[in-house]
Image (cartoon, rainbow, N blue to C red):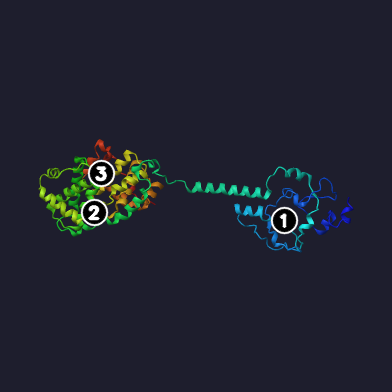
Amino acid sequence: MAGSDENNPGVIGPRNLQEEGFRAGGGKLVSGIGHNRRALSSINRNIIGAPPYPYAVNKNAFSEKQADFNKKPSIPVHRPITRKFAAELSNKQQVIPEETKKPGQLAPKPSEFEDCTIIDAEDDEESSDFSAPMFVQHTEAMLEEIDRMEEVEMEDIDDEPVFDIDSCDKKNSLAVVEYINDLYTNYKKAESSSCAPSNYMSQQSDINERMRGILIDWLIEVHYKFELMDETLYLTVNLIDRFLAAQPVVRKKLQLVGVTAMLLACKYEEVSVPVVEDFIVISDKAYSRKEVLEMEKLMINTLQFNLSIPTPYVFMRRFLKAAQADKKLELLSFFIIELCLVEYETLKFPPSLLAAAAIYTAQCTHYGFRQWSTTCEWHTSYSEEQLQECSRLMVNFHQNAGSGKLTGVHRKYSTSKYGYAAKTDPANFLLEARY
């Protein structure tokens, strides 16, 4: 049988292969042609195996006569391994073991392999255990490891995720979950044009910011006695400031401006509106019905009937939901922001920042340490640093709430109805500088 290799020119025997310098991936070369004889094209590539970093060479890059293995492989070794890359390797390219690469070696013709006999009994038994080429298994293992590393990295980044605060209201049509983000985006755009200038009192000759504070502190008590909605109080303060910024008023008419603004706010917000006589009585009959109606006409025309504006209350409700506030934290937040309604210097802050700072200050007061979650920052669009100036003012207001003449808010929130929120110790540590 060994002589048949010499007589038959179409068969390449072991000697010929050794002379040609060809070696097939660790397989054994035998001269016998028996039951174990197979063509190279039908041999499972698992027998040969793949080197750790295979050179993938495109078949079309070889000519029938010769090819230079010293040339750079068509696919670089350092190319990132992706699923697409693995598919290219398995479907379109031929993997050549690294040990077959020799300088100046000629590429064997496809026809030269047809009758070649390569036998490895041990590898032949092991090859049946694998259903996919080894380099494909190696690539899939690396891809799985990459996916696992990406999952770990994402877990490290998302230490504190932003919670979906509207998930519990998806079945509540009144919550308008589909439009809620657009609504508050519009509120943020509109708040700058719906607030009074922070220095408008300089244009008034007969009143000052102290008088304004006394008026609003009194109106807070009136609002509490009439048991009106929270929205009504915030809209009343906004109407007063916008009107005083556009119209000069003498001090004798300042209380009339206040009760008229509350009357307008009631007509806009309340279901059951107090009558004009109720406001005349509450102001100790200082004004007549005719004076109230004339002031109402002047005010509504001065404001150009624009009563649909975002007040701090609008943002308070949304931001409290983001903070996942309980009833105690909610009452403390409203106590702090109502203290700001009385203070003229808080007009320099937009309503959204006032609301965010009030909740931040209330959280710090309630928990005893600085607290501002990623969810709160996301929904308020204010970082903790942006709230520091306003928050320090609020702590000062809290410290002085029970002293002086303007104690209407403190008395209101010292009752059981409002959870004795005014008796909470202020967060004095917020006044300390952060390093």
What residue does disc 2 label?
306
The amino acid pointed to by label 3 is Asp
Label 1 neighbour load within 10 Å: few <14, some 14-19, many 20+: some
Question: Regarding mark 3 in the picture, which secondary structure is present there?
Answer: helix
> Marks 2 and 1, Cα distance to the nearest angstrom?
81 Å
Q: Residue 322: percent from the left, percent from the top?
A: 37, 45
Reading the chain from its start, which is encountered first: label 3 or label 2?
Answer: 3
Question: Regarding mark 2 in the picture, which secondary structure is present there?
Answer: loop
Q: Is residue 37 left or right of residue 259?
A: right
Residue drawn 30% across and 50% down? 354
> Marks 3 and 2, Cα distance to the nearest angstrom?
19 Å
What residue does disc 1 label?
98
Q: Residue 329: percent from the left, percent from the top?
A: 32, 41
From this view, report whether residue 364 is shown above or below residue 56.
above
Reading the chain from its start, which is encountered first: label 2 or label 1?
Answer: 1
Label 3 neighbour load within 10 Å: few <14, some 14-19, many 20+: some
The amino acid pointed to by label 1 is Glu
Do tag 3 and tag 2 residues touch (Cβ < 8 Å)? no
Reading the chain from its start, which is encountered first: label 3 or label 1?
Answer: 1
What residue does disc 3 label?
230
Q: Residue 425: percent from the left, percent from the top?
A: 30, 41
Q: Residue 395: percent from the left, percent from the top?
A: 29, 47
In the image, 90 versus 14, the foreground residue is 90
Residue drawn 70% across and 59% down? 59
In the image, 288 versus 182, the foreground residue is 182
Q: Is residue 204 left or right of residue 28?
A: left
Q: Is residue 44 left or right of residue 214?
A: right
Do tag 2 and tag 1 residues touch (Cβ < 8 Å)? no
